[in-house]
C-alpha cells in the first residue's frame, strides 16, 4: 500500500515538473518575442510591465491545462495548485532580486490572479479531449 502511494506521489510530481518546465519554455519563447518586438519597433516602455504579467498568466494557463488534461479529474484543484506554485516561485525570485520590502496586501491580488488563471486553465484542460 505504501509503495502504491509513493508511486502516485512520484507520478504526480513528475507531471507537475513536466508542466512547469514546458510552461517555463513557453515563457522564454514569449519573452524573446516580446524583446524582439521592442527592439525593432519603438513602443512605449510602459507596456513592458503589463505584457510581462500577461505572459506569466499565459504560462500559468498553459501549465494548468497541460497538467489537468493529463490527470482527467479535479482540474480546478490542479490548476489552483499550479497557479500557487508559480506564484511562490516568482515570489522567491522577487525576494532575491528586490531591494525593497513588500506588504502582504500588495501580493495577495497577484496570488489571486495566478490561482484564478490556474483554476480556469484546469477547468479547460479537463474538458479537452
Image (cartoon, grey):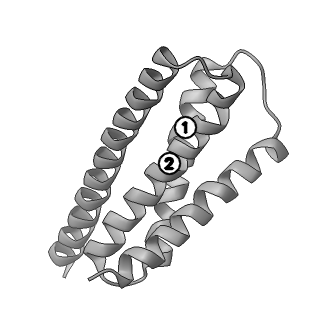
Which disc number belongs to residue 90?
1
Question: Which quadrant holds residue 126?
Answer: bottom left
Asked if disc 2 and disc 1 are in contact, CB closer than 8 Å, the reply is yes
Is 78 above or below relative to 31?
A: below
Is 121 above or below relative to 29?
A: below
Image quarter hosting the C terminus:
bottom left
Question: Circle 2 sits in a helix, a strand or a loop, which is it?
Answer: helix
Which disc number belongs to residue 64?
none
Residue sticking out furthest to the front: 41
Per the model, the C-alpha gap separating discs 2 and 1 is 6 Å
Image quarter hosting the N terminus:
bottom left
Question: Which quadrant holds residue 42?
Answer: top right
Question: Which quadrant holds residue 31?
Answer: top left
At a point 33% along the width and 66% down the height, the residue shown is 67
At a point 81% along the width and 42% down the height, the residue shown is 106
Q: Relative to 48, is 121 on the left or the right?
A: left
At a point 21% along the width and 65% down the height, the residue shown is 11
Is 4 above or below relative to 63?
A: below
At a point 30% along the width and 74% down the height, the residue shown is 69
Is 56 above or below relative to 101?
A: below
Question: Circle 1 sits in a helix, a strand or a loop, which is it?
Answer: helix
Amino acid at each position: 500500500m505504501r509503495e502504491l502511494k509513493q508511486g502516485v506521489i512520484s507520478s504526480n510530481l513528475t507531471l507537475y515538473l513536466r508542466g512547469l518546465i514546458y510552461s517555463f519554455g513557453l515563457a522564454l519563447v514569449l519573452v524573446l518575442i516580446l524583446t524582439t518586438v521592442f527592439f525593432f519597433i519603438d513602443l512605449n516602455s510602459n507596456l513592458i510591465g503589463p505584457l510581462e504579467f500577461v505572459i506569466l498568466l499565459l504560462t500559468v494557463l498553459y501549465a494548468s491545462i497541460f497538467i489537468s488534461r493529463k490527470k482527467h479529474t479535479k482540474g480546478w484543484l490542479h490548476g489552483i495548485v499550479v497557479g500557487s506554485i508559480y506564484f511562490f516561485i516568482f515570489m522567491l525570485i522577487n525576494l532575491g532580486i528586490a531591494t525593497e520590502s513588500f506588504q502582504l496586501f500588495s501580493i495577495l491580488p497577484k496570488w489571486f490572479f495566478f490561482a484564478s488563471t490556474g483554476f480556469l486553465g484546469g477547468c479547460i484542460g479537463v474538458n479537452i479531449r
